[in-house]
Image (cartoon, rainbow, N blue to C red):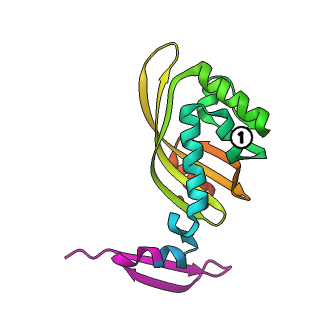
Amino acid sequence: MDVLTWSVWTFDEDDLITRIEIYRDHEEDKAREAAGLRRPGMSQENVEVVHQVIDAVARQDLSRLIELTDPEVEWQSFMADLGGGGTYRGHDGIHQYLQDVSEAWDLLLSEVEDTLVVGDLVLVVAQVRYRGKGSRVEARSPAGFLVKLRGGRVLKIRAFRDPEHALEAVGLGE
């Protein structure tokens, strides 16, 4: 019989194990809390804002994106980068980001597979569906998004072509 357990290991400054906590399979939320990781229920408002941003990008809704982002927002996108952009700053940058997306892609849609709250960050793992404007070829790729919020608005978004890189950025990768 297989038994799924969650373990939380604590190390000291010399990388020596100081504590190991074991949780049963139905105690995933307790294990995540002990490790300093929380699923959406613990910061549902931030997760909801991130989902609204993803939806606004898919609809290319500039006014909604302005509402959901901090005036000092910094947006690092690999999809717009393929169209010539990359890092966008402030609300003017959000406007430019949507223009770059519109020029390069007929379709850009992120389908969220999982979210994880790590401190004040929301980590999103998604499948991105996109269709090139010139080629009309539709494709799908995994992606990771690391989102920092301030005052209930997005302050920083960093997109990763590989979700594992987003996990590594918060110290959770292999």
Q: Is residue 39 visible?
A: no
Rate crowding at label 1 as few (under 14), some (14 to 19) or many (20 or more) other CA atoms within 10 Å. Answer: many
Judging depth in this view, the residue of 63 and 92 nearest the camera is 63
Q: Amino acid at mark 1?
A: Ile
Q: Secondary structure at mark 1?
A: helix
Find out whether residue 28 is within the magenta segment. Answer: yes
Residue 139: image x %, image y %? 42, 28
Query: Quadrant of the image for the N terminus?
Result: bottom left
Residue drawn at point x = 49 percent, y = 35 percent:
109
Residues 101 and 10: in front is: 101
Q: Which residues are magenta?
A: 1-29
Against 4, residue 169 (above or below) is above
| Image coords of residue 96 (percent x, y) | 72, 28
Q: Residue 7, can we see it? A: yes
Residue at 47% of width from left, 45% of height from top?
Answer: 126
* Residue at 74% in and 59% down: 151
Q: Residue farthest to the top?
A: 134
Residue furthest toward the bottom? 18
Give the left or right position of residue 157, taking residue 138 as reference. right
Q: Residue at x 55, y 32 (%)?
A: 59
Q: Residue furthest left?
A: 1
Would you say 127 lies left or right of 121 here? left
Give the total number of marks visible in the rendering: 1
Q: Position of residue 33 (x, y in %)?
A: 53, 76
Q: Position of residue 132 (x, y in %)?
A: 50, 20
- The picture quadrant where one finds residue 77 is top right
Q: Mark 1 sits on what residue?
A: 66
